[in-house]
């Protein structure tokens, strides 16, 4: 049977999609190749959210095509995911060595299409059509690929987004919001927990809109909170996370869920994008700065320990120096634990790409640098306050940077590195924080109060 190598760009949803495709292919007898250099099938799962991500995947494919053409012309090359969806046939016109272009509603067809191409029945396949029910096709997991147990897992609960933020390509690459049913999701979670998973992250492009059109409110609870309630009930599951939510979805039912559900961790990734009401409106975000700050206050009241991270775009069209100052002041006001800063990138077919007042690249870079300094200074200060404290971590496995050490996560989503061994994997344990690095804590399990 052939071997496959999948390289993933972009977000956690893409990681999850790649995992499901890999698991589907393995079920058909494929093996996972350790690198693209030896794989019979090479798939790039792409991201379109910024131009840089697209260029990276395109360049990668150019290099792969040159190498395979020289050394093993029978290798099968494919694009899948968001850029495959938005560019379709154009990708093959541009890179004729590519055999397969698989859109975001077609991941589950990978095995069939590759089978046809490998058997020589079909030459090139492009499938970027919409497919009813495709939101429920991302369900296979690669647990225990090695002998070691997997502690955390991602579960895809919905696909698509109807928010249409003016900068964002996602509604065009992921389609309309479509949600799986609660029993279907809970069954998948239960199965994972029975295989040793302790923490589940519920995934979607806008999880707070989960089930909006298909599941009615019950006792004042939105469909998403009903789902959280159901997942809370799973015995043996220790922690629930989710990403990404939208601030407008933080109704009181969700805030109250943080206070009520012990498995829902004290952590929220709440993309704010800008601190200026004028820019938020141009972005079509659907909330004001005051509303956003109000949500953070309520969350901190419900769970004082909560870790808050965010996404911020600098240099959105029309963003003035004053607008940017308001983003800086928001960073000071909220004091994020972590923030991902993005320089605005024009995306095809999005309204913002045509807006007046496109900000010069140099200004985007300056603002990126200034904001990063503020974010890092605040986060550094916050991380230092953890030194000397005892915190619960869930141990995930060896540290990527230094495999001799183990790594776990606090409930508030801080990574803690400590001297441990394989026997700690999957354990919930208390550590004393001894040192803080940038966005990492160091702990000692031996010294407890
Ligand atoms: N330019 C820059 N950043 C973007 N993001 C989404 N679209 C764009 C764009 N056109 C950022 C947003 C989002 C994150 C995943 O990517 O901050 O929350």
Image (cartoon, rainbow, N blue to C red):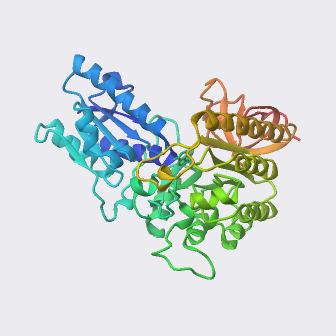
Q: Which quadrant holds residue 59? A: top left
Q: Is residue 329 above or below residue 368?
A: below
- x and y percentages locating residue 8 in the rendered image: 43, 37
Q: Residue at image x 64%, y 36%?
A: 363
Q: Is residue 289 visible?
A: yes
Q: Position of residue 224 (x, y in %)?
A: 56, 68
In the rendered image, which quarter contains the C terminus?
Answer: top right
Direction from residue 348 to residue 30 in the image, left or right: left
Vertical order, 423 against 206 (above or below): above
Q: Quadrant of residue 2?
A: top left
Residue 9 in sight? no
Give the percent coordinates (x, y) of residue 149.
Answer: 53, 40
Q: Who is closer to the viewer here, 165 or 143?
A: 165
Q: Residue furthest left?
A: 121
For the residue pair 203 and 420, the one nearer the viewer reads as 203
Q: Judge left or right: residue 272 versus residue 152.
A: right
Q: Position of residue 132 (x, y in %)?
A: 31, 65
Quadrant of the rendering where the N terminus is positioned: top left
Is residue 378 depicted above or below 279 in this figure?
Answer: above
């Amino acid at each position: 049977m052939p071997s496959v190598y999948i390289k993933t760009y972009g977000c956690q949803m893409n990681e999850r999609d790649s995992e499901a495709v890999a698991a589907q292919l393995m079920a058909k007898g494929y093996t996972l190749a350790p690198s693209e250099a030896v794989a019979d099938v090479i798939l790039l799962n792409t991201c379109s959210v910024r131009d840089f991500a697209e260029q990276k995947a395109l360049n990668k494919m150019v290099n792969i095509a040159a190498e395979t053409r020289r050394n093993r012309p029978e290798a099968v090359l494919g694009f899948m995911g968001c850029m495959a969806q938005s560019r379709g046939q154009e990708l093959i016109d541009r890179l004729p060595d590519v055999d397969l272009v698989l859109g975001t509603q077609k991941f589950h067809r990978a095995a069939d299409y590759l089978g046809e191409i490998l058997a020589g029945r079909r030459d090139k396949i492009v499938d970027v059509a919409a497919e009813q029910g495709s939101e429920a096709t991302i369900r296979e997991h690669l647990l225990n690929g090695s002998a070691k147990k997997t502690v955390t897992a991602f579960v895809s609960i919905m696909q698509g987004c109807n928010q249409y933020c003016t900068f964002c390509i996602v509604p065009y690459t992921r389609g309309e919001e479509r949600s799986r049913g609660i029993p279907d999701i809970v069954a998948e979670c239960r199965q994972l927990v029975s295989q040793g998973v302790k923490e589940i992250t519920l995934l979607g492009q806008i999880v707070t809109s989960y089930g909006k059109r298909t599941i009615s409110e019950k006792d004042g609870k939105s469909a998403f909170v009903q789902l959280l309630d159901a997942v809370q009930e799973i015995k043996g599951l220790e922690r629930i996370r989710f990403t990404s939510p939208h601030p407008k979805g933080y109704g009181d039912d969700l805030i109250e869920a943080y206070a009520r559900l012990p498995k829902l961790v004290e952590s929220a990734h709440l993309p704010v994008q800008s601190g200026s009401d004028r820019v938020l409106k141009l972005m079509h975000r659907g909330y004001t700065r005051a509303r956003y700050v109000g949500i953070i206050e309520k969350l901190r009241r419900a769970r004082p320990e909560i870790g808050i991270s965010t996404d911020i775009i600098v240099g959105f069209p029309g963003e003035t120096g004053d607008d940017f100052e308001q983003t800086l002041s928001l960073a000071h006001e909220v004091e994020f634990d972590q923030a991902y800063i993005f320089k605005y990138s024009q995306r095809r077919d999005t309204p913002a790409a045509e807006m007046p007042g496109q900000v010069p690249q140099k200004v985007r870079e300056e603002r990126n640098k200034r904001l990063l300094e503020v974010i890092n200074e605040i986060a550094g200060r916050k991380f230092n306050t953890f030194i000397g404290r005892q915190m619960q971590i869930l141990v995930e496995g060896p540290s990527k940077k230094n495999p001799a050490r183990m790594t776990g996560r606090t409930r508030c989503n801080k990574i803690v590195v400590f001297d441990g061994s394989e026997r700690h994997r999957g354990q919930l344990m208390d550590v004393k924080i001894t040192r803080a690095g940038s966005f990492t804590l160091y702990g000692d399990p031996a010294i407890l109060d």
